[in-house]
């Protein structure tokens, strides 16, 4: 099969409606949660942060910070998943550049997760201490 034929098989019609585009995006999110263990972990922590925010009645600004951090971690995990999928599609062999791409994208998620955890501690530890 020629490259042109392969590309045409997977190219989606460019003229698509707004709802179709959102549908594809939600399919991607569903797929990531269904296949990626770390997406489930991030989702679990996101739910915990939202519950803690409601229980501790965090401020408007603290809500914005928490929601922004949750969104950034999940978005980076989605990008990481996409990079891994494309890399796996291109090669299944041990390849320095494929490993680097996967490791660096995973590292980006790790950095954002650690920063988010520290910021979460700064927000929630004083509220927890107030209970005692």
Image (cartoon, rainbow, N blue to C red):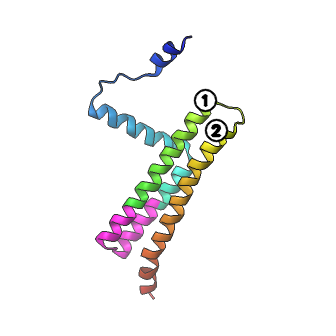
Relative to 44, is 20 above or below?
Answer: above
The x, y position of residue 104, in whole percent, is: 59, 49
Q: Secondary structure at mark 2?
A: helix
Closer to us: 115 or 50 = 115
The residue located at (35%, 22%) in the rendering is: 13
Foreground of the two, 93 or 47? 93
Pointer 2 residue:
98
**Residue 10 picture location, percent across and down:** 46, 22
First-in-chain label (2 vs 1) = 1
Which residue occupies the extreme right position in the image?
Answer: 94
Q: Do the residues under discs 2 and 1 have CB atoms within 8 angstroms?
A: yes
In the image, residue 120 lies at what x, y percent? 46, 70
Is 61 one of the magenta-colored residues? yes
Please tell me which residue is depicted at 37% across the width and 73% down the height of the picture.
55
Report if residue 33 is visible in the image: no
Label 1 neighbour load within 10 Å: few <14, some 14-19, many 20+ = few
Q: Residue farthest to the front?
A: 97
Q: Is residue 34 magenta?
A: no
Tell me the CA gap for discs 2 and 1.
9 Å
Report the number of numbered marks: 2
- Quadrant position of the C terminus in the picture: bottom left
The residue lying at 54 percent from left, 64 percent from top is 114
Q: Which residues are magenta?
A: 46-67
Which quadrant, please, contains the N terminus? top right
Q: Which residue is mark 1?
A: 90
In screen coordinates, is 60 left or right of 76? left
Say which quarter of the image contains residue 58.
bottom left
Residue 11: quadrant of the picture: top left
Looking at the picture, tell me which residue is in the foreground, 124 or 61. Answer: 61
């Amino acid at each position: 099969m020629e490259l042109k034929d392969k590309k045409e098989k997977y190219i989606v019609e460019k003229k698509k409606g707004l709802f179709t585009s959102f549908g594809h995006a939600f399919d991607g999110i569903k797929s990531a949660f269904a296949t990626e263990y770390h997406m489930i972990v991030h989702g679990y922590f996101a739910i915990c942060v939202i519950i803690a925010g409601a229980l501790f009645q965090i401020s408007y600004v603290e809500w914005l910070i928490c929601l922004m951090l949750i969104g950034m971690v999940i978005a980076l995990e989605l990008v990481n998943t996409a990079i891994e999928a494309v890399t796996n599609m291109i090669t299944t062999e041990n390849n320095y550049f494929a490993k680097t791409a996967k490791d660096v994208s995973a590292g980006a998620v790790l950095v954002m997760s650690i920063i988010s955890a520290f910021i979460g501690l700064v927000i929630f530890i004083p509220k927890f201490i107030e209970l005692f």
